[in-house]
Amino acid sequence: MTVYGYVRVSTAEQVDNTSMQEQRRQIKGNAMSHGLAIDRFVEDGGVSGADPFFQRLLANNVTLKAGDTVIVAKLDRFSRDLLDALQSIKACKELKVKLIINGHGDVTDASNIYAQLMLEILCSFAGHERRVLKERQKLGQAAKRKAGGHLGGSAKFGYAIEGTGQAATLVAIPNEQAALAYAKEMRATGMSLRAISNVLKTSHNVIVSHEAIRKALQGDEK
């Protein structure tokens, strides 16, 4: 029998030691109240609660067996998807694995009627919270993009990244912008991307791959 403590923070949340440590503290306390000791902590940093619970466990090389116990600090650390939450609880019951969620007790215990009711209600709210968070992210990204902010990853040809993190912005590189404008004109005549790449080496003294040109022109071609 193995007792697991499951800890998670998502990509939309700050992945910091304080959050993880607080979850571990709550899990240890919950384990003690059930006369258990944690054998292993499973920690997911930057992982969405919308991802299937058992899939997250497998990604951490955890395969639950009969007699195992999983303890989670909060409902939304376990799952933010109502269907997956209920299916995961059902799977735990069938495997004879205990799932203890702080504040709800063993939700695989058929006699824990109150916990079952509260779990279904709260899972619905957790799913709603995820949708609201996703919408806020979308609006925030749109606002940042409109203001010239950088959303992550490498800059497309024609731009450079200035600053880091939330302060990162995209700044146009004049000679690359001129080369890009010429590339658009050549592409409009039907010239291949590889040919355009070769032309830019001599016309604008710019070395750029055909793939970088393709990405830079995305949105301009129908």
Image (cartoon, helix red, strand yellow):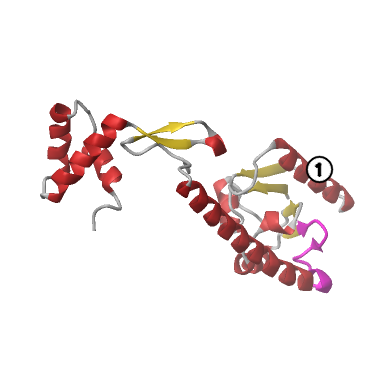
Q: Position of residue 166 (x, y in %)?
A: 56, 39
For mark 1, give the secondary structure: helix
Q: For residue 47, say whether it is visible.
A: yes
Please report the bounds of the magenta region as a residue range: 100-115
* Residue 169, above or below 134: above
Q: For residue 88, say whether it is visible.
A: no
Q: Is residue 120 magenta?
A: no
Frontmost residue, 28 versus 123: 123
* Residue 205, above or below 51: above
Q: Position of residue 208 (x, y in %)?
A: 24, 32
Quadrant of residue 171 within the rendered picture: top left
Q: Residue at x 68, y 38 (%)?
A: 16
Q: Position of residue 162 (x, y in %)?
A: 46, 31
Frontmost residue, 203 versus 130: 203
Frontmost residue, 219 versus 34: 219
Q: Residue at x 46, y 47 (%)?
A: 145
* Residue 123, above or below 168: below
Q: How many marks?
A: 1
Frontmost residue, 193 versus 72: 193
Q: Is residue 102 magenta?
A: yes
Classify residue 222 as left or right of residue 69: left
Q: The residue under label 1 is which amino acid type?
A: Arg
Q: Position of residue 8 (x, y in %)?
A: 66, 48
Task: Say which residue label 1 marks.
Answer: 25
| Disc 1 packing (10 Å; few <14; some 14–19; many ≥20) | few
